[in-house]
Image (cartoon, grey):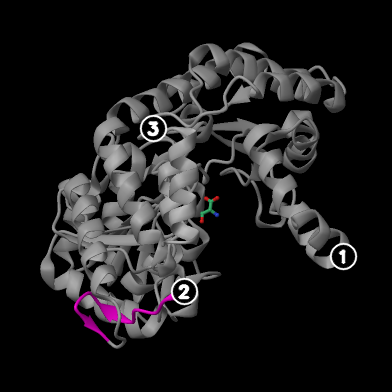
């Protein structure tokens, strides 16, 4: 039936083929090292395919503007409770549909146009939404950068504290997307609070490491709000959240989420987020530890093979990320494209010494090991990945030749780990239940 349908409708066939081929390409034939991605477990994916994807639920649980939501309400409360248990707070809101939406709502709740924000600078990994080019700028808030210490690859705490005391901003942001060492939440929060500013810490990249207990939880160190996505080191569906220490902040930001930034919050992700939260409750510690061990192992293996990995003097990294300076190997664009040809997927990235005009061809490559860890890879496999990368980037071997070895290597890692396991028969049963719940 399907074959006939596809043969009669070339547009449908193209849509079908692109989807299936992409899935095989990225889930079976490539080593994915994009630091902001991950894969869900089969159970989370199957529950993601539920009817809630068709429904609307403006407002908060049990106070909606639509009917028919009694199970959604209970599920949203349960999912928030699960995430709150992992983050040590009762105040979690899963309605932001992305990390950027969570940032927008938190920024809007505590500022008005013309106010100032002191932000962790782009060199310290700030996400574009924290800047004048992104959400902060769209809200008319002035960006003032904290000083960066290149020796520490972190915020210069003493200078940042002085700056906050002078500028007296309404908000201070920490965290970001190129993030190898924890930002100093405690002293920054003390300075921010002394001038009446709120601290918003964007933990999108490290949420899974926080719930796994290997990265400090900013809420425990004085941050007022954490904002996050739910699909990076926390391996859930694409989406966002914010969490606060205080109920009043939770309510303030919640009032902004709806009606200002989100109408419907993509309800089908609630079940998948909850399942991933439960998986992290059970396997998160072991997973997060292995992620950091793998990042350090990959960094060391790349460095031993002649690549310049930043911050060797501080052990390279404390997160899932490894940062390469490839200015000697032809810069980021060329290297990322050569690796892509070999089926090793990374992204080029600005490094602290790059100039704004270098944005299209920066000197860095950002690598994340959270997905390969989820596929069950350990330190030994990091050596093999480093060898593939070296063959392409240092030895100049043909990417097509390396690609054959990458595809063969990838075949050994077909099952998602650190998750609830179900049988193939149960997967089919669940799929049927989602499609035909008779
Ligand atoms: N663009 C994402 C990243 O790659 O870090 C964050 O939104």
Check whether the beta carbons of the residues at disc 2 and disc 3 lie within 8 A of each other. no
On the rendered structure, is 211 left or right of 315?
left
Say which residue appears at 19% left-offset and 69% top-offset.
Answer: 250
For marks 2 and 3 on the same chain, the one whose residue lies earlier in the sequence: 2
Residue under label 2: 54
Say which residue appears at 14% left-offset and 62% top-offset.
Answer: 194
Mark 1 secondary-structure assignment: helix
Q: Is residue 149 visible?
A: no
Say which residue appears at 53% left-offset and 11% top-offset.
Answer: 380
**In front: label 1 or label 3:** 1
**Foreground residue among 294 and 68:** 68
Disc 2: residue Cβ within 8 A of ligand 1's nearest atom: no
- Quarter of the figure with the C terminus: bottom left
Residue 79's disc is none
Give the magenta range: 55-64
Q: Counting other residues with Cα less than 10 Å from the Cα at mark 2, is it few (<14), some (14-19), or many (20 or more)?
A: few
Taking the magenta stretch, the answer to whether it contains residue 298 is no
The chief SS type of the magenta part is loop
What's the distance in space between the residues labelled 2 and 3, CA to CA? 27 Å
Q: Is residue 317 above or below residue 126?
A: above
On the rendered structure, is 359 left or right of 299?
right
Taking the magenta stretch, the answer to whether it contains residue 60 is yes
- Quarter of the figure with the N terminus: bottom right
Residue under label 3: 421
For marks 1 and 3 on the same chain, the one whose residue lies earlier in the sequence: 1
Q: Is residue 180 above or below residue 297?
A: below
On the rendered structure, is 293 left or right of 224?
right
């Amino acid at each position: 039936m399907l074959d006939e349908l596809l043969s009669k409708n070339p547009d449908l066939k193209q849509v079908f083929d692109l989807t299936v081929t992409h899935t095989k390409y990225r889930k079976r034939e490539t080593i994915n090292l994009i630091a902001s991605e991950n894969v869900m477990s089969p159970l989370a994916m199957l529950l993601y395919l539920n009817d809630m994807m068709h429904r609307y639920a403006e407002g908060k649980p049990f106070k909606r503007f639509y009917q028919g939501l009694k199970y959604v309400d209970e599920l949203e409360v349960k999912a928030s409770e699960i995430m709150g248990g992992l983050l040590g707070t009762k105040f979690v809101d899963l309605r932001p549909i992305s990390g950027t939406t969570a940032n927008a709502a938190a920024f809007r709740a505590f500022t008005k146009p013309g106010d100032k924000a002191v932000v962790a600078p782009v060199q310290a990994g700030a996400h574009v939404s924290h800047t004048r080019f992104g959400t902060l700028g769209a809200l008319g808030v002035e960006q003032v950068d904290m000083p960066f210490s290149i020796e520490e690859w972190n915020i210069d705490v003493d200078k940042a504290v002085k700056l906050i005391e002078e500028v007296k901003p309404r908000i201070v942001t920490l965290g970001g997307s190129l993030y190898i060492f924890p930002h100093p939440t405690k002293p920054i929060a003390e300075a921010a609070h002394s001038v009446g500013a709120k601290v918003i810490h964007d933990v999108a990249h490290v949420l899974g490491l926080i719930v796994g207990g290997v990265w400090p939880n900013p809420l425990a160190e004085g941050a007022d709000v954490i904002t996050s996505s739910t699909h990076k080191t926390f391996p859930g569906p694409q989406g966002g959240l914010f969490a606060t220490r205080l109920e009043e902040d939770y309510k303030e930001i919640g009032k902004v989420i709806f009606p200002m930034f989100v109408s419907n919050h993509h309800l089908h992700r609630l079940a998948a987020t909850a399942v991933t939260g439960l998986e992290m409750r059970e396997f998160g510690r072991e997973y997060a530890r292995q992620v950091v061990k793998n990042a350090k192992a990959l960094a060391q293996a790349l460095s031993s093979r002649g690549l310049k990995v930043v911050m060797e003097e501080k052990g390279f990294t404390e997160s899932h990320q490894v940062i390469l300076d490839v200015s000697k190997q032809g810069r980021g664009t060329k290297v990322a494209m050569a690796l892509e040809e070999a089926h090793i997927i990374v992204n080029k990235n600005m490094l602290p010494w790059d100039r704004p005009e270098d944005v299209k061809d920066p000197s860095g490559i950002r690598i994340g090991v959270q997905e390969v860890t989820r596929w069950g890879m350990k330190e030994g496999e990091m050596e093999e990945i480093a060898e593939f990368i070296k063959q392409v980037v240092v030895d100049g071997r043909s990417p097509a030749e390396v690609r054959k070895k990458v595809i063969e290597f990838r075949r050994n890692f077909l099952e998602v780990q650190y998750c609830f396991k179900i049988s193939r028969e149960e997967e089919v049963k669940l799929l049927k239940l989602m499609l035909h719940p008779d």
